[in-house]
Image (cartoon, rainbow, N blue to C red):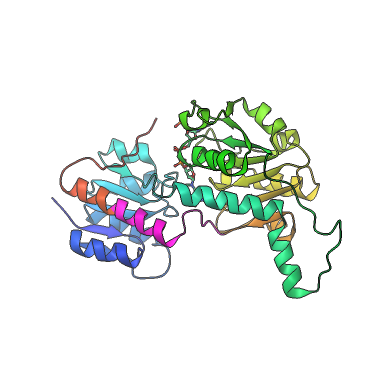
Amino acid sequence: MNKKVYVTRRLPEKVMQLMNKTFEYDVNPEPRLATREELINGVKNYGAIITMLNDNIDSDIISMAGPDLKLIANYGVGFNNIDVKAANERGIYVSNTPDVLTDATADIAFTLLFAAARRVIEGDNIVRTSSFAWAPEYMLGYDITGKTIGIIGAGRIGANFGRKAALGFNMKVLYYSHRNSEQLDSIDAEKVELDELLTRCDFISLHVPLTPETKHLIGAAELAKMKSTAILINTARGPVIDEKALAEALTQKVIAAAGLDVYEHEPDVEPVLKTLKNVVLMPHVGSATFGTRDNMGFLVVRNVEAVLEGKEPVNMVRVK
Ligand code: NAP
């Protein structure tokens, strides 16, 4: 059995140290994404490959996998960058890193919500670049505590975010999801249809994975149904929102504001968004805390170790 692992990008130092003790590996030493040739070399010549969420492991790359490849271990919970069906058809497992990044990602959704509702970036810019003077109607934003929040996709992150909203900020929680969420039902959240959520909520936060079903789940028609005071947060995946439609809606004040961590064509961002004051833009950093990125790496190592020992990965991704 080929027990050597290819790592498409250096992981945090503590994770590299753990890997040194756990298995033999080669790593792309450059501070950039692996090239397509490097990915092909990885799938052809190794027993497992550790990939980043922006490595595109499509069916073409998978078709070039060598007979030794047993696992594609993604450093991230989302796995829309991997053709899981093509991998499974060739007997290759896919794994991801759930749970360890749930709090960090829910926290960044809150960061965006607060920054957008209370105009944090605008305020910071004013203080740095000009002068300010308190006045009764100066820099007004939106109330958060006690307001209604809508969660689209009540899985691990969506439910965690909803509980924080209800328990920390006394918010009324509505959610739209495939299944009931026990965690949200236990705080008296209401499971509703998408249209009802769009029309009733003051804040809407996206937590669905990117699938053919969720691409452009939020477009011009959905934005038009939201309150003109609504604030939309996206920490899921960029293509869940039609980004051009969102830029237009923010320009025309169809909705009040947005907070985005992810973009439709990363790392590109719709240029109009960059000109607007009513959107807060973060560079896909949902899980980017010291502790979380270490824990994601430790989980990746556990998955690789299991497969190299002839077992199933601990966090196996399956196509539905
Ligand atoms: P999860 O536990 O699988 O939650 C996703 C939820 O969405 C599930 O309850 C799922 O229901 C539901 N869902 C899927 N498709 C739906 C649809 N069409 N309509 C309604 N509900 C739908 O995943 P998670 O761990 O919470 O992560 C969610 C996503 O966050 C990831 O896929 C990833 O893309 C994103 N993420 C981003 C960052 C970042 O850095 N910004 C960090 C971490 C994660 P079923 O399971 O019943 O299908």
Picture residue at 84% right of the left edge, 59% below the top? 138
Q: Position of residue 167 (x, y in %)?
A: 56, 40
Q: Position of residue 258 (x, y in %)?
A: 68, 49
Quadrant in the rendering for residue 196 = top right
* Residue 230 visible in this rendered orientation of the protein: yes
Furthest-left residue in this view: 1
* Residue 67 visible in this rendered orientation of the protein: no
Q: Position of residue 75 (x, y in %)?
A: 37, 53
Q: In front here: 126 or 73? A: 126
Q: Viewed as shown, does residue 212 lie left or right of 133?
A: left
Picture residue at 43% right of the left edge, 67% below the top? 32
Dominant secondary structure of the residues highlighted in magenta in the image:
helix
Rendered position, 130 above or below 182: below
Q: Viewed as shown, does residue 258 lie left or right of 101?
A: right
297 falls in the magenta region: yes
Rendered position, 185 above or below 27: above
Quadrant in the rendering for residue 190 = top right
Q: In front here: 195 or 83? A: 195
Quadrant in the rendering for residue 145 = top right
Q: Which residues are magenta?
A: 283-300
Picture residue at 41% right of the left edge, 50% below the top? 76
Picture residue at 38% right of the left edge, 70% below the top? 30
Q: Position of residue 98 (x, y in %)?
A: 39, 44
Q: In front here: 293 or 149? A: 149
Rendered position, 253 above or below 189: below
238 falls in the magenta region: no
Quarter the C terminus occupies: top left
